[in-house]
Every structure is written in C-alpha cells, then in structure tokens.
Amino acid sequence: MTTQNDTPIQIIPNKKSRVISDINTEEEESMVEWLKEHPLLYNKKLSSNKDKGKKDSLWSEQATLLGKDVSNIMVWYQSIRTRYGRLSKKKSGSGAGELTDRDNWILEKFDFLKGHIHEVRSRTAVSISDIYIYIYILHMHNIL
C-alpha cells in the first residue's frame, strides 16, 4: 500500500494489549487475606462459585478499595495462582533448582489454594490418517 506521494505505508497487525499489574507488597498481603475470606473465588465446589455476578461484584469492590482497575488485580491473581500451581507441583531433588524468596513467599501465602488447583491433562489430538488406519484395522479383522 502506498500514500499519494508513493511512500510505502507499513501495516502493523494489531497486538493484543497486555495488562500489567502494579500491586505493591502491602497490597499483595491485603489481597492474600481478602482472597482467603472469599473462597467462592477459588473453591469450585461451592455453588456460589458459579455466580459470575457475585464474583464480579467482589472483584470490583476490592479493586475500588485498592484504587486499581479490576483487570489489574485479576491479572495479578491469575498470574500468582498459575505460579503457585507450577511451584507446588515441582518435585524436590537435584533437578528442581533453587527457589527464590518470591517463590517461597508464594508457596507459603497461597497454601490455602492447595486442593483447589487441579492439573488439566492435555488431550491428544487424533489425525484423520490415524482414524483411517484404525478403520482399516477394524475392517481387516471383520469388526466393521
């Protein structure tokens, strides 16, 4: 594409904007206590966990209390929760590596999430050729 004076125009694809959390240490401590007081945000066994309106309202109130955007504190929580999940499933031993002070803080403060985070196993994709081979084998054995 060019402009009227034949200068090429560079088209840059839109990048998804990222929300970066700016929560300080004091606010993090406050968030940990707040999360512990509101298990409906992390305990999927509670019937109230399915109430999106109630959860949205809680996140909104907490964001207002901290003077942050809702997306800011939710990104912080999702990031910390993911990191806690990864850290908690690491096995100790020679290949595990040293944990940082931050890692130890996360493991200690978010221990209440233990039992609420479950690994979702990835599904194996089956190709069309695998299906044809399977059908062929079934056909050869007179199963089809």
Image (cartoon, rainbow, N blue to C red):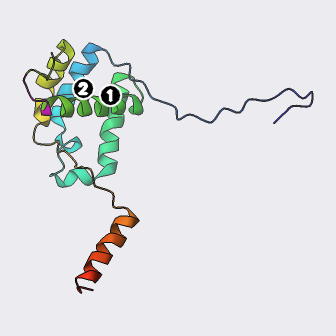
Mark 2 neighbour class, 10 Å CA radius: few under 14, some 14 to 19, many 20 or more: some
Q: The C terminus lies in which quarter of the figure? A: bottom left
Region rendered in magenta: 89-93
Element type where label 2 sits in the image: helix
Depth check, front residue: 38 or 143 = 143
Q: Position of residue 124 (x, y in %)?
A: 29, 55
Closer to us: mark 1 or mark 2?
1
Q: Position of residue 115 (x, y in %)?
A: 10, 42
Mark 1 neighbour class, 10 Å CA radius: few under 14, some 14 to 19, many 20 or more: some
- Using residue 16 as the reference point, say whether residue 106 is left or right of it: left
Kindly indicate whether the residue at mark 2 contacts the one at mark 1 (C-beta within 8 angstroms): yes
Depth check, front residue: 52 or 139 = 139
Seen at 26% across and 50% down, the residue is: 122
Which mark is drawn over residue 76?
Answer: 1
Q: Is residue 98 above or below residue 114?
A: above
Q: CA distance from mark 1 to mark 2?
A: 10 Å
Q: Which residue is mark 2?
A: 31
